[in-house]
Image (cartoon, helix red, strand yellow):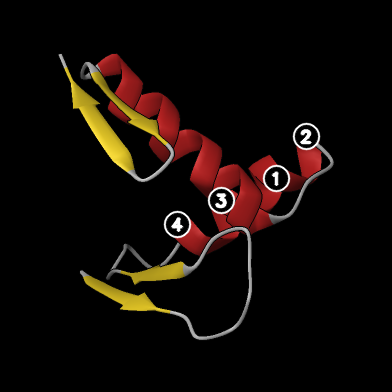
Amino acid sequence: MQIVESKAASRFPARMEMRVPAALRHAVEIAAERQNTKAAEWARRALLSALAAEGIRLRGSNIDAA
Protein backbone atom coordinates (compact mmCIF):
# COMPACT_ATOMS: atom_id res chain seq x y z
CA MET A 1 0.00 0.00 0.00
CA GLN A 2 1.29 3.44 -0.88
CA ILE A 3 0.23 6.70 0.78
CA VAL A 4 1.10 9.94 -1.01
CA GLU A 5 0.61 13.48 0.27
CA SER A 6 -1.15 15.64 -2.29
CA LYS A 7 0.03 19.18 -3.02
CA ALA A 8 -3.43 20.23 -4.23
CA ALA A 9 -5.73 21.90 -1.71
CA SER A 10 -8.32 19.32 -0.76
CA ARG A 11 -10.50 18.09 2.06
CA PHE A 12 -8.49 14.88 1.81
CA PRO A 13 -4.80 15.77 1.37
CA ALA A 14 -3.40 12.20 1.25
CA ARG A 15 -3.87 9.53 -1.44
CA MET A 16 -3.74 5.81 -0.76
CA GLU A 17 -3.09 3.12 -3.36
CA MET A 18 -3.30 -0.65 -2.86
CA ARG A 19 -3.52 -3.84 -4.87
CA VAL A 20 -6.94 -5.48 -4.85
CA PRO A 21 -8.67 -8.45 -6.52
CA ALA A 22 -9.65 -7.71 -10.11
CA ALA A 23 -13.40 -7.50 -9.46
CA LEU A 24 -13.19 -5.30 -6.35
CA ARG A 25 -13.07 -2.00 -8.23
CA HIS A 26 -16.25 -2.83 -10.13
CA ALA A 27 -17.95 -4.06 -6.94
CA VAL A 28 -17.13 -0.74 -5.21
CA GLU A 29 -18.52 1.18 -8.19
CA ILE A 30 -21.77 -0.82 -7.99
CA ALA A 31 -22.07 -0.26 -4.22
CA ALA A 32 -21.39 3.47 -4.64
CA GLU A 33 -23.97 3.76 -7.39
CA ARG A 34 -26.56 2.10 -5.13
CA GLN A 35 -25.87 4.76 -2.49
CA ASN A 36 -25.79 7.55 -5.08
CA THR A 37 -22.20 8.51 -4.32
CA LYS A 38 -18.78 8.25 -5.93
CA ALA A 39 -16.61 5.15 -5.58
CA ALA A 40 -13.90 7.06 -3.69
CA GLU A 41 -16.42 8.36 -1.13
CA TRP A 42 -17.94 4.90 -0.69
CA ALA A 43 -14.46 3.40 -0.17
CA ARG A 44 -13.54 6.12 2.40
CA ARG A 45 -16.73 5.43 4.35
CA ALA A 46 -16.19 1.66 4.21
CA LEU A 47 -12.60 1.97 5.47
CA LEU A 48 -13.60 4.36 8.27
CA SER A 49 -16.42 1.99 9.31
CA ALA A 50 -14.05 -0.99 9.34
CA LEU A 51 -11.50 0.96 11.41
CA ALA A 52 -14.21 2.01 13.87
CA ALA A 53 -15.25 -1.64 14.23
CA GLU A 54 -11.62 -2.33 15.24
CA GLY A 55 -11.80 0.45 17.85
CA ILE A 56 -9.77 2.92 15.77
CA ARG A 57 -11.24 6.37 15.10
CA LEU A 58 -9.81 9.36 13.28
CA ARG A 59 -10.25 12.75 14.92
CA GLY A 60 -8.92 15.31 12.48
CA SER A 61 -5.28 14.33 11.96
CA ASN A 62 -5.17 12.34 15.22
CA ILE A 63 -5.85 8.62 15.71
CA ASP A 64 -7.78 7.37 18.72
CA ALA A 65 -7.00 3.66 19.10
CA ALA A 66 -9.03 2.43 22.06
Q: Residue 25: where, in percent of width, then height?
A: 51, 62
N-terminal of the two: label 4 or label 1? Answer: 4
Left or right: residue 59 versus residue 20 is right
Mark 2 and mark 1 in contact? Answer it, CB < 8 Å: yes
Q: Residues within 10 Å of mark 2 (few under 14, many from 20)?
A: few
Residue type indicated by callout 3: Ala
Q: Residues within 10 Å of mark 4 (few under 14, many from 20)?
A: few
Above or below: residue 38 compared with residue 45: below
Residue drawn 32% across and 62% down?
Answer: 21
Q: Which residue is mark 4?
A: 24
Residue drawn 58% across and 60% down?
Answer: 26
Left or right: residue 64 versus residue 28 is left
Mark 3 and mark 4 in contact? Answer it, CB < 8 Å: yes
Q: Which residue is mark 1?
A: 32
Q: Which mark is residue 10?
A: none
Q: Which residue is mark 3?
A: 27
Residue type indicated by callout 1: Ala
Q: Residues within 10 Å of mark 1 (few under 14, many from 20)?
A: some
Q: Which residue is mark 2?
A: 35
User: Looking at this view, is 17 or 59 the one in front?
Assistant: 59
Left or right: residue 60 versus residue 30 is left
Residue type indicated by callout 4: Leu
User: Looking at this view, is 41 or 13 the one in front?
Assistant: 13
N-terminal of the two: label 3 or label 1? Answer: 3
Residue drawn 54% across and 60% down?
Answer: 12
Residue type indicated by callout 2: Gln
